[in-house]
Image (spheres, rainbow, N blue to C red):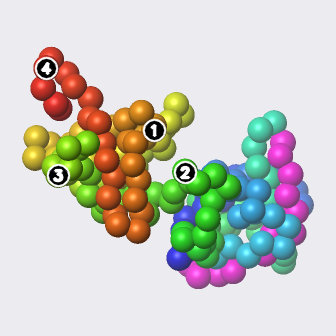
């Protein structure tokens, strides 16, 4: 599956390196030497240099050797082919696309809603669930989402309780 993994930022130096806004949790693999990424215009770019400078990922690409060349690609989105069904490093690793569309059930088995999005926040990921009462945000931690069945497209959630009722 083709997934968004980054965005080219401003040029760094004069040799065609670009700052990269990383949009993947596996930057080491997606942007490794020799990795091929595709731009939103369909052009393929092969990574030929990788380094981190002051906490910012810098990439160089084959055939791009000047500041002007990389500036022409500024704000270009980068995509990679990713097997979302491949096992992750941990058994609890999931791709956002695997979670969206899952039915969210309560512990008693009754339907609570449907996962419509996953917010990647600094503290933890948060499931956005469309429920009858509206949109409910549930932190994606084991204590509040004890069961995730990707094959069955079901998650069990313990939604937050505010003032004695579920929100």
Locate residue 30 relative to residue 162 in the image: left or right: right
| Mark positioned earlier in the residue sequence (2 or 4) | 2
Identify the residue position indicated by label 2 in the image. Answer: 92
Task: Say which mark, if any, is on residue 142.
Answer: 1
Residue contact between numbered discs 2 and 1, judged by CB atoms under 8 Å = yes
Identify the residue shown where x is 76% and y is 49%. 57
Determine the main secondary structure of the stretch shown in magenta: strand
Label 2 vs 1, first from the N-terminus? 2
**Residue 49: quadrant of the picture:** bottom right
Precedes in sequence: disc 1 or disc 4: 1
Query: Of residues 8 and 48, which is closer to you in this image?
Result: 48
Question: From mark 1 to mark 3, how far is it between C-alphas?
Answer: 19 Å
Who's the residue at 25% across and 42% down the image? 107
Report which quarter residue 66 is drawn in: bottom right
Provide residue 160's location: percent of width, then percent of height: 26, 29
Q: Position of residue 151 (x, y in %)?
A: 41, 68
Q: Is residue 66 left or right of residue 98?
A: right
Dot 4 and dot 3 residues touching (CB under 8 Å): no
Which residue carries the number 3 mark? 111
Residue tagged by mark 4? 164
Query: Rounded to the nearest whole Å, what is the CA distance between mark 3 and mark 2?
Result: 23 Å
Label 3: how many residues lie within 10 Å, few (<14), some (14-19) or many (20+)?
Answer: some
Where residue 45 sits: x, y (%)? 73, 76
Task: Write down the region rendered in magenta.
Answer: 40-53
Q: Of label 4 and label 3, which has the lower sequence position?
A: 3
Residue 68 visible? The answer is no
Q: Is residue 113 visible?
A: yes
């Amino acid at each position: 599956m083709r997934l968004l993994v980054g965005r080219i930022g401003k040029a760094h130096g004069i040799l065609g390196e670009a700052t990269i806004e990383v949009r993947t949790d596996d930057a080491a693999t997606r942007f490794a030497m020799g990795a091929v990424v595709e731009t939103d215009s369909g052009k393929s770019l092969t990574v030929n240099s990788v380094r981190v400078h002051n906490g910012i990922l810098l990439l160089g690409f084959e055939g791009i050797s000047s500041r002007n060349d990389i500036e022409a690609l500024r704000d270009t989105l980068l995509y990679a082919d990713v097997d979302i069904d491949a096992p992750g490093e941990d058994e609890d690793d999931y791709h956002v696309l695997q979670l969206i569309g899952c039915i969210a059930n309560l512990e008693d088995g009754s339907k609570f809603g449907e996962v419509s999005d996953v917010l990647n926040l600094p503290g933890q990921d948060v499931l956005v669930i469309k429920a009858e009462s509206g949109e409910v945000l549930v932190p994606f931690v084991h204590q509040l989402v004890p069961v995730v069945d990707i094959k069955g497209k079901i998650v069990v959630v313990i939604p937050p309780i505010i003032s004695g009722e579920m929100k």
